[in-house]
Image: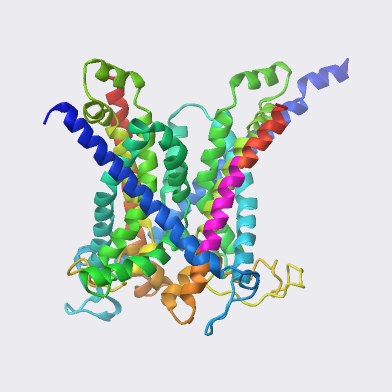
Amino acid sequence: MNAKRIDKVATGILYAIAGFVVIILIALLGYILVQGVPEISWHFLTSPALAFEAGGGIGIQLFNSFYLLLLALLISLPISLGAGIYLNEYAGQNTITGLIRTTIEILSSLPSVVVGLFGYLFFVVQFKLGFSILSGAFALTVFNLPILTRSIEEALANISDSQREAGYALGLSRWETVTKIVVPAALPSIITGVVLSAGRIFGEAAALIYTAGQSAPALDFSNWNPFDISSPLSPLRPAETLAVHIWKINSEGIMPDAKAVSAGASAVLIIAVLLFNFLARWLGKRLYKHLTAE
Amino acid sequence: MDKIRASLLKKSVASKIERRGKIISLSCLALIILVVFLIFYFVASRGLATFFSNHINLWSFLSGTQWNPGTVGTNGQPAVGALPMIVGSFLITIFSAIVATPFAIGTAVFMTEISPRRGAKILRPVTELLVGIPSVVYGFIGLQVVVPFVRSTFGGSGYGILSGTFVLFVMILPTVTSMSADALNAVPRYYREASLALGATRWQTIYKVVLRAAIPGMLTAIVFGMARAFGEALAVQMVIGNATLLPQNLVSPASTLTSILTMGIGNTVMGSLQNNALWSLAMILLLMSLFFNLVIRYIGRKGKLNHER
């Protein structure tokens, strides 16, 4: 075979491989949506789950997922912002900074089940928080910190130095330059990073099984006192999330319509992740336009 | 005069704010580092207790094939042989990487070299989206589609290494693909131009120049995928069968470190041998994740040297 024939054959094979992968990916998305979307109804999204009979919903799990997401972001955003600022604006190029970066990389590569087990040992047992929203939110924070720190650091690094020099020239201190000029300028990409990490948190289950717990006690949605245990806002109640719910009903197998419920819940998860993705892009663009007055 | 003198000698408001800001941001960073050390300390303190408090021999832990902590095995020692889980974890990691690599690299080459326009428009957004699909969803599909398929095609119960491999293959495929595509994109354009100018065909250029130049990046992508596969818990736990036996074949129920961990931690009493043995499994996971990290760094350093030469 001459070189041209080989080139043609190789190109054909590459087309086949790429086509095959596309088919797998589309089949995957299609399967979830085709199986799951018919299950989604207002009743399914709002009613509580039933353990032993068919027809339960995912209302409480859905609420728990969003509540945990919100708390985890509230805790992890300030910490990652501070860490990102230090890494990009203050830290020098030396061995210690290199070690710190390595440590953060190690944290981001830890399996989420290990993060969950640490959360169990540290927050649930050591701090006696029990299986609770708070333990879950802390575990998700540990899981989220390295990713968010990295994306914030990158966002800050993309701001040109002339912006910082302008700040110094006006007599601002470094901190003032960072908080008043650099962070606002990097806001679009920071927000994109936050929303993308929200998508990851939303679908996380392994870190939550032994921190937020695997049960979803009934909630009284008319009681908004956060110190009452039956209130949706109570941070000390166990809270099974949507992703944990899918895992649990599939591995226990006592729910008669587990397949339908998990199909619907999977579709809801996928749609939420999709929305987070689009939202991240849209918000980034929108904010950029708004802030730069273009 | 004294007022001016005092104001000159005192720290200005701005420098105070500056100092405070620096301390705040440094303490955020220190907190993250502290968390990493706490994770290692806590997991190690529990995991090592198996060997120091319960006096289990490290070698018998790693090579034993009976896992039933709480009962006594045939050798008179507690039955804490982790080999079935270790073998299970390594097998599905290696198999899924072997299956995923050709597909991922083929797709990445297609995306960057053959049809960059379609790659950028369709393939890249889709792969990036799939990276974000929650692992329980992969597990659910594995349970509904892969397990019945394996059962009817290869026999057995359908649960086992093979199903785990299929699920992980699809799971790491998007990650490895998009990282490989990044590596290929990073190859300078003039490499290709030089090769084409010498009369090489497109495939010769890809195979002899572009792929070789991108080897470190693609290796990183594969190791990254393997690290993800090794640490994946729920998706694997749902399809592998969770029998703590050495896998006899690819379709017999098996188990991985992560699957036994997710099943067991809640059912054992803190501080007991059963519990400590599970923490030792977690420690192996932690060490392996560290190992994958080291490999990635090593490849990265080697790759840099290659480009500088």
Provide residue A246's location: percent of width, then percent of height.
Answer: 49, 69
Residue B186 appears in the rendering: yes
Indicate yes or no whether the magenta region holds residue B276. no
Q: Is residue B282 above or below residue A289?
A: below
Indicate yes or no whether the magenta region holds residue A278. yes
Seen at 30% across and 23% down, the residue is: B307
Judged from this view, the residue extending furthest toward the left is A1
Quarter of the image for the N terminus of chain A: give it. Answer: top left
Provide residue A273's location: percent of width, then percent of height.
Answer: 54, 53
Q: Magenta region: which residues? A: A267-281
Q: Is residue A64 left or right of residue B1?
A: left
Provide residue A281's location: percent of width, then percent of height.
Answer: 59, 41
Provide residue B237's location: percent of width, then percent of height.
Answer: 36, 67
Q: Is residue B52 above or below residue A54?
A: above
Quarter of the image for the C terminus of chain A: give it. Answer: top right
Q: Is residue B33 above or below residue A172?
A: below
Seen at 32% across and 64% down, the residue is: B257
Seen at 54% across and 84% down, the residue is: A53
Which residue is at the front of the view, B184 or B81?
B184
Q: Is residue A106 left or right of residue B164?
A: right
Q: Quadrant of residue A292?
A: top right
Q: Quadrant of residue B149?
A: bottom left
Residue A125 appears in the rendering: no
Which residue is at the front of the view, B192 or B228?
B192
Please, what is the dominant secondary structure of the magenta stretch?
helix
